[in-house]
């Protein structure tokens, strides 16, 4: 499909051994025909709309092309440009900063809320909280950013009005460099933390109650119990949540596009915004493809690094 | 005895339950606050939309903003486009994922492993990385600036295929074997035995597809250049760009209208949605 998707860690049913049935070629032919028909739409679609475009991106990144004139071979020029152009460099810096802060914030908020919701309370109340935290996920990031642009307006926004009640001077949320990045992060995390929250709630439910009870009997309580027992048991879920969180954060687009359009200056311009602008506003398809390839490499590298690190820290029961 | 020890240690050392629940309530309010504000402000007259403090219940409730948004943009057309795109993608994904998932789970054929590996590998490829060549492929097919150009490339779903494969693998193998002994061919076994059991899995695929594509912004922004092909999120963002800040409540009325189907799916299909979201990284 379209977005980054990672299967949850889930025990797989054992693979079925090949049937020792006597070879009946008519049936086999029928099965193969059926398999071909069933797979055709998916495999053809994936080849045309994912495999060919990946190869196409790499090839295009080696050319200068504006769609109108004939493409001309550029060698590594597009990559050299990406590594020297200040806007591209700034966009990678912004995206990495955004990724670190947004994912950290998202995971901490989600974890604290999941632990709190997991505590004792009436069942209906728990499901009210769970629905509330998960609700922003079903809204459109673009439309919500439209709403947030009003809420964070310096002069008439509700956020500054609320801060004014406790004596804070109006903050230029969308128009000063540091505040703009903070606003983009806040709006993104507001919509995304529900995803990690749902993962953590599921992970906590999978921890056997006896472990907690045994720990309590041994005198472990409160924070110490969580740090020493809950977190290690939750570490596979933490890994999934952080991998998916990071992959998604590296592709952030809607929030900065609608809230600040990358500004002020280049303060909130992200890598995907640069891809969009150089391809579809400046018609520099080769340059845009080079940035796309670099983003892909970055995503793969970060994911690989995470799985390596996790070997040391993730505990499977 | 152990019960008593447990509750004792809890009351003594962990956060008091009322404090924890109060904290959660504040967080829930912060989470829903922007949505509540959106609905309540959309019900004010455009002139009152700026009023601070923001009142939960508008002083003089009015649907002026709603008629305003119908005057400013062709809401019906945007909604029709969004519905068409989303519904066709959802149905298309249920079909492609159901068929391919079944083939990977229950049929034997050559190159099964490498083909499944290919499907899994494409789950890792972000759309933003391939968008330039995808745009060029669609352009060569004459599908840019058409709704079909949004719909067709979204039919194959790597994650949906993976999910349906797991789903079919979870069904008892004996059912198919019994049908085979009764003389059923591979098509009959699929059609009469396994397909009827697949509805809950297909519901997850469909609900996820709906949630993602109803809210989708990046692809429509790139593919659709004429206003007649805009979907709702695209129409609303351009509405905000075209109007001055004076028409807040008009824009918010549009946002509320565009939320209705998403909220309906949230209410009706919350369980498949939750299951889908937690087994995928689907969001935005």
Image (cartoon, rainbow, N blue to C red):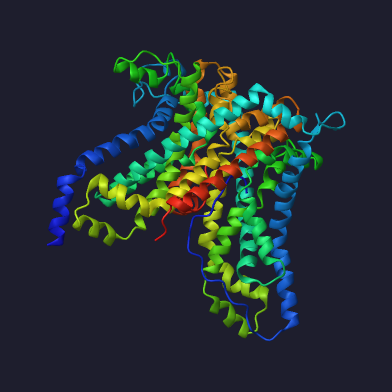
Q: Seen in the image, is B200 located left or right of residue A216?
A: right
Q: Quadrant of the N terminus of chain B?
A: bottom left
- In the foreground, A80 or B201: A80
Does residue A118 appear in this view? Answer: no
Q: Quadrant of residue A197?
A: top left
Q: Is residue B130 in view?
A: yes
Residue furthest to the front in view is A312
Front residue of A2/A73: it is: A73
Of the pair B82 and A289, the residue shown nearer to us: A289
Spot occupied by residue B191 in the image (x, y as percentages of width and height)? 62, 70
Percent position of residue B34, x then y: 41, 30
Relative placement, left or right, of A75 versus B130 is right
Judged from this view, the residue extending furthest toward the right is: A70
How many marks overall? Answer: 0
As drawn, A115 above or below A266: below
Where residue A291 sits: x, y (%)? Answer: 68, 33
- Relative to A48, is A181 above or below? above
Is B46 on the left or on the right of B113, as rendered? left
- Seen at 51% across and 29% down, the residue is A145
Identified at 53% across, 62% down, the residue is B199
Q: Position of residue B3 (x, y in %)?
A: 15, 59
């Amino acid at each position: 499909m379209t977005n980054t998707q990672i299967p949850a860690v889930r025990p797989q049913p054992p693979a079925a051994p090949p049937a020792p049935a006597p070879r009946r070629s008519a049936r086999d032919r029928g099965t193969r025909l059926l398999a071909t028909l069933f797979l055709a739409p998916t495999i053809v679609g994936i080849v045309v709309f994912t495999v060919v475009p990946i190869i196409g991106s790499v090839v295009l990144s080696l050319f200068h092309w504006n769609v109108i004139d004939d493409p001309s071979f550029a060698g590594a020029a597009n990559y050299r440009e990406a590594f020297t152009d200040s806007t591209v460099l700034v966009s990678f810096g912004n995206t990495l900063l955004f990724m670190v802060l947004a994912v950290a914030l998202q995971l901490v908020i989600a974890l604290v809320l999941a632990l709190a919701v997991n505590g004792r309370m009436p069942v209906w109340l728990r499901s009210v909280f769970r629905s509330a935290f998960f609700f922003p996920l079903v809204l459109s990031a673009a439309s919500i950013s439209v709403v947030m642009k009003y809420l964070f307006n310096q002069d008439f926004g509700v956020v500054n009005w609320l801060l004014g009640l406790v004596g804070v001077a109006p903050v230029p949320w969308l128009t000063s460099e540091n505040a703009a990045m903070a606003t983009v992060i806040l709006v993104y995390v507001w919509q995304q933390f529900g995803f990690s929250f749902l993962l953590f709630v599921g992970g906590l439910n999978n921890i056997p109650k006896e472990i907690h009870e045994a720990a309590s009997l041994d005198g472990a309580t409160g924070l110490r119990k969580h740090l020493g027992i809950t977190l290690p048991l939750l570490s596979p879920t933490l890994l999934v949540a952080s991998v998916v969180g990071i992959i998604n954060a590296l592709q952030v687009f809607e929030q900065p596009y609608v809230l600040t359009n990358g500004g002020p200056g280049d303060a909130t311009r992200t890598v995907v915004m640069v891809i969009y602008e150089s391809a579809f506003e400046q018609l520099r398809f080769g340059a845009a493809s080079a940035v796309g390839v670099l983003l892909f490499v970055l995503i793969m590298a970060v994911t690989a690094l995470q799985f390596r690190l996790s070997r040391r820290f993730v505990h499977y029961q | 005895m152990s019960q008593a020890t447990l509750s004792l240690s809890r009351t003594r050392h962990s956060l008091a339950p009322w404090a924890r629940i109060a904290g959660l309530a504040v967080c829930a309010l912060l989470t829903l606050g922007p949505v509540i504000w959106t609905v309540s402000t959309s019900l004010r007259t455009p002139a009152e939309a700026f009023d601070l403090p923001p009142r939960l219940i508008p002083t003089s409730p009015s649907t002026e903003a709603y008629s305003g948004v119908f005057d400013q943009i062709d809401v019906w057309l945007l909604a029709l486009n969004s519905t068409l795109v989303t519904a066709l993608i959802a149905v298309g994904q249920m079909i492609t994922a159901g068929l391919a998932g079944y083939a990977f789970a229950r049929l034997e054929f050559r190159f099964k492993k490498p083909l499944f590996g290919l499907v899994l590998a494409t789950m890792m490829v972000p759309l933003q990385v391939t968008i330039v060549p995808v745009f060029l492929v669609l352009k060569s097919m004459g599908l840019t600036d058409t709704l079909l150009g949004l719909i067709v490339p979204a039919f194959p779903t790597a994650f949906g295929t993976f999910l349906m494969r797991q789903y079919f693998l979870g069904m008892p193998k004996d059912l198919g074997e019994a049908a085979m002994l009764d003389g059923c061919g591979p098509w009959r076994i699929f059609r009469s035995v396994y397909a009827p059991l697949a509805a809950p899995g297909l519901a997850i695929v469909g609900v996820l597809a709906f949630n993602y594509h109803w809210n989708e912004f990046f692809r429509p922004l790139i593919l659709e250049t004429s206003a007649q092909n805009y979907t709702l999120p695209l129409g609303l963002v351009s509405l905000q760009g075209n109007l001055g800040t004076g028409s807040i409540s008009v824009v918010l009325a549009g946002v509320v209208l565009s939320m209705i189907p998403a909220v309906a799916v949230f209410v009706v299909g919350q369980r498949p949605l939750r299951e889908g979201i937690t087994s995928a990284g689907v969001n935005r």
